[in-house]
Every structure is written in structure tokens, then in C-alpha cells.
Amino acid sequence: MLDTFKELIANQYDATLRTLKACIDRCPEAAWDARVGNWTFCQVAFHTLFFTDLYLGQNIDSFHRQPFHRDNEHIFRDYEELKDRPPTLRYDNTWIKAYMTHCRNKASEVIVAETANTLKAQSGFEWLAFPRAEVHIHNIRHIQHHAAQLSLRLRIDGHADIPWIKSGVLPGTR
């Protein structure tokens, strides 16, 4: 059952991240800093990847210590996403695509490494009072929520029609 769960979760991470990637890839330059609700397109993309990255990790401390974060301190700065205030920073499309690659690779590595014990353990985040297995479901739902926002904005503005991606297979899961 564990292998089946891991395969299904890996497939759904891949599908949601590919949906988000399609939104990012198809966003025209003129729309990159345009509003999507209360934030700009680039801020929504960053926020989605930021929390994907966070929830794939064990806790906030391990999140900050990642080599990707240390190599990109100038981008993460004060981790404004973890503060109770609206985002102010803007993010370059090329960098967001690099962050996407980091998150997709991390998802693959994390899911492969999960065990029955790690999935039963608590989330590692005080505001998520449920087991780690459910954190993965929560994370996938969060990615899809924001991908849907970005997709709708692109569709309404006539920029792109984002396809529905049913399932995917992350590298290293089979």
C-alpha cells in the first residue's frame, strides 16, 4: 500500500506542478506583473512554489538551510512569505522557472524517501495539525488552487488556454 500511495502522490505532484509550469511558461511578459486578485502573477507563482518547497521539507529550519535557499539569499531575503503582510517583491520569470525545477526535483526526491513512519508522523509545521501524508495532499491542493487562479487570468485575458493535466510521473518514482 505504501508504494501505491507514494506513486499516486508523486503522479499528482507532477500533474499539478506541470499545470503551474504551463501557466508560467504561457504568461506573456506584459502580464507577468499584472494583477491576479490581490497579488501580481509573478507573486502568485512565487508564493505557490515557496509553499510547495516549504511543505516538501520537514520544518522551517530545514527549509532555510537548503543549498538552493543559501545560493539565492538575495531572492528569499527576509522570507516575506512567512510574515503576516502582503508581498512586495517581484520575481523574474527566468528565476521562477529555476525555482520550479528545484521544486519538481525536490518533490521527486522527497516522495521516494518517504516511509510509513514519516508519513504517519506529524507535519513538522505547528499550523498544520495533521500527519505528513496529509501535508502532501494539502500541498497538492494548494498548488492546484493557485494554478487555477493563474490559468483563469490567462484565459480571461485571452493569453492562453491551460490544459488539464490528469497525472504525471516524476523522475525516479518508477
Image (cartoon, rainbow, N blue to C red):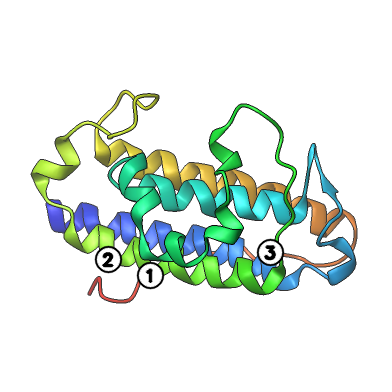
Residue name at image x 57 percent, y 44 percent: 78
Q: Which residue is mark 1?
A: 105
Horizontal side, residue 38 vs residue 92: left or right: right
Horizontal side, residue 137 vs residue 132: left or right: right
Q: Which residue is mark 2?
A: 109
Residue name at image x 83 percent, y 70 percent: 28
Circle number at residue 62: none
Amino acid tagged 2 = Glu
Q: Position of residue 101 (x, y in %)?
A: 48, 72
Q: Is residue 19 above or below residue 54?
A: below
Disc 1 packing (10 Å; few <14; some 14–19; many ≥20): some
Task: Give the farthest residue toward the left.
Answer: 117
Contact (Cβ within 8 Å) of mark 2 with mark 3? no
Q: Position of residue 23 (x, y in %)?
A: 68, 64
Horizontal side, residue 155 vs residue 174: left or right: right
Q: Quadrant of residue 174?
A: bottom left
Q: Quadrant of residue 133?
A: top left
**Residue 118 visible in image:** yes
Q: Position of residue 54 (x, y in %)?
A: 42, 47
Q: How far apart are the alpha carbons under marks 1 and 3?
A: 19 Å
Q: Which residue is mark 3?
A: 23
Q: Position of residue 7 (x, y in %)?
A: 25, 61
Residue name at image x 76 percent, y 54 percent: 41
